[in-house]
Image (tube, rainbow, N blue to C red):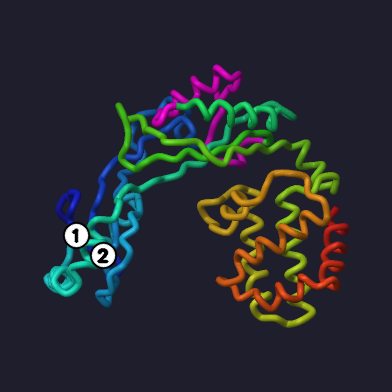
C-alpha cells in the first residue's frame, strides 16, 4: 500500500473512511513499559485518525473521528476500488447537503489517557484534593512534565507513575485529555485533567469489612437487587441487564474504563461519598432510570419503586453493610 496522507480515502471492513490525521504516539513517563523517563520522546505507535463516510450499503454515517494505532489495523485497511470511488462520487452528487454536513464536521479527535501515581498510605484523599486544586491553575495546554512540575509546587510527588492501576496498593488516579496530533518536541500536549480519584488499601479493607458503603458498594447492591428481581419474576430484560453488570462491576473496581462504557458512566456520575441506605437506594433507582430505554427496564423499575421492593433493597444493603 502507498504511504497514506491526510485526505486519502481507504476502506476497512467494507466501509469507506477518510484519513483526517497522521501522527505519532510518543512514550510518556506513565507508559507501563516506558521505563519512566528513559524512553520519553521515542515512538510508541503510529496513530491514524479516520472518519467514516458510509457503510457497505452506501448509507452516510455521522463521520465522528476515531483514532487507531496503525499497527493494529494495517492488515485490515485497503485503498478504495473503482466501485468504492464511484460510491463516494454518487454520495456527493445524490446527497450534496448531507455530504457537505459530513465534510464540515469538526474533525478534532480527543484521546484520554489514564494515569496512576503512588502515594503513601492514608494520604490519597488529601493528595486528591490538592491535585484538584493544582489542576485549576494549569495553562490551556501543557506537557506531562509541566503537570509534574506544577503539582510539585502543591506538594505532590509523581515520581512513581504508570498507566496500570494494579501497580500500586495506594495511588491517586486521573485522566489526561489530549487532542491527537498535538505535541511539541515529541512531547504530547494535554488539554485538561479530569476524573481525579484515589485508592487506599486500608480504606478498601474497611469497605470490604462493611464499615464504609461507597459508590462501588452502591453498584454491587444494585446488581444484587436486579438479580433478586430477575429470579423472582423471570424478567428476561432484568436477567440480561444483570449479565452486563458483572463485567461492569469488575471494570469499575479496577477502573478499566476504556473497556466498559457503563462503568465509566457510573463512575463519572455518582458522588464519592459514604452512602446511607436511603441515599444509596435513590441512586440505584436513578441510575437504572438512565439505562431504562437502552435495556428495557421499565417494568422492573415500576416494581422496584414499590414499598415491597424498597424493603427488599434494605435487606440487600444491610447484608452488604
In the picture shown, does residue 236 fall above or below 213? below
Q: Residue at x 50, y 21 (%)?
A: 150
Residue nearest the viewer, comparing 114 with 65:
65
Q: Is residue 26 left or right of residue 37?
A: left
Q: Residue at x 77, y 67 (%)?
A: 225
Dot placed on the residue nearer the N-terminal end, 2 or 1: 1
Residue 33 at x, y percent in the picture: 47, 36
The quarter of the rendered structure image containing the N terminus is bottom left
Q: Is residue 62 left or right of residue 284?
A: left
Region rendered in magenta? 139-168
In the picture shown, does residue 153 fall above or below 44? above
Task: Write down the quadrant of residue 82 in the picture.
Answer: bottom left
- The residue labelled by disc 2 is 53
Q: Is residue 150 shown in magenta?
A: yes
Q: Residue at x 37, y 33 (%)?
A: 188
Q: Is residue 123 left or right of residue 186?
A: right
Residue nearest the viewer, comparing 159 with 123:
123
Q: Secondary structure at mark 2?
A: strand
Crowd class of label 1 (few under 14; some 14 to 19; many from 20; radius 10 Å): many
- The residue labelled by disc 1 is 9
In the picture shown, does residue 130 fall above or below 198? above
Q: Is residue 311 left or right of residue 35?
A: right
Task: Write down the quadrant of residue 126 in the picture.
Answer: top right
Amino acid at each position: 500500500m502507498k504511504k497514506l496522507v491526510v485526505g486519502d480515502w481507504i476502506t476497512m471492513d467494507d466501509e469507506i473512511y477518510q484519513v483526517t490525521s497522521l501522527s505519532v504516539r510518543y512514550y510518556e513517563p506513565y507508559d507501563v513499559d516506558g521505563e519512566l523517563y528513559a524512553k520519553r520522546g521515542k515512538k510508541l505507535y503510529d496513530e491514524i485518525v479516520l472518519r467514516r463516510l458510509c457503510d457497505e450499503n452506501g448509507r452516510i454515517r455521522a463521520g465522528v473521528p476515531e483514532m487507531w494505532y496503525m499497527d493494529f489495523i494495517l492488515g485490515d485497511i485497503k485503498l478504495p476500488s473503482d466501485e468504492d470511488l464511484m460510491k463516494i462520487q454518487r454520495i456527493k452528487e445524490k446527497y450534496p447537503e448531507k455530504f457537505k454536513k459530513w465534510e464540515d464536521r469538526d474533525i478534532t479527535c480527543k484521546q484520554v489517557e489514564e494515569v496512576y501515581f503512588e502515594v503513601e498510605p492514608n494520604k490519597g484523599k488529601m493528595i486528591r484534593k490538592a491535585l484538584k486544586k493544582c489542576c485549576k491553575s494549569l495553562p490551556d495546554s501543557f506537557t506531562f512534565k509541566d503537570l509534574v512540575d506544577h503539582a510539585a509546587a502543591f506538594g505532590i510527588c509523581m515520581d512513581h507513575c504508570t498507566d496500570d492501576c494494579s501497580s500500586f496498593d495506594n495511588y491517586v488516579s486521573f485522566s489526561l485529555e489530549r487532542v491527537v496530533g498535538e505535541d511539541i518536541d515529541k512531547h504530547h500536549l494535554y488539554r485538561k485533567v479530569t476524573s481525579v480519584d484515589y485508592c487506599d488499601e486500608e480504606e478498601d479493607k474497611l469497605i470490604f469489612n462493611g464499615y464504609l458503603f461507597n459508590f462501588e458498594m452502591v453498584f454491587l447492591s444494585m446488581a444484587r437487587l436486579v438479580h433478586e428481581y430477575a429470579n423472582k419474576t423471570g424478567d428476561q430484560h432484568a436477567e440480561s441487564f444483570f449479565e452486563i453488570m458483572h463485567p461492569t462491576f469488575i471494570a469499575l473496581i479496577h477502573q478499566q474504563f476504556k473497556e466498559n462504557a457503563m462503568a465509566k458512566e457510573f463512575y463519572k456520575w455518582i458522588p464519592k461519598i459514604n452512602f446511607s441506605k436511603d441515599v444509596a437506594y435513590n441512586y440505584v433507582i436513578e441510575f437504572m432510570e438512565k439505562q431504562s430505554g437502552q435495556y428495557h427496564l421499565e417494568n422492573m423499575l415500576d416494581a422496584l419503586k414499590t414499598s415491597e421492593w424498597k424493603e427488599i433493597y434494605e435487606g440487600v444493603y444491610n447484608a452488604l453493610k
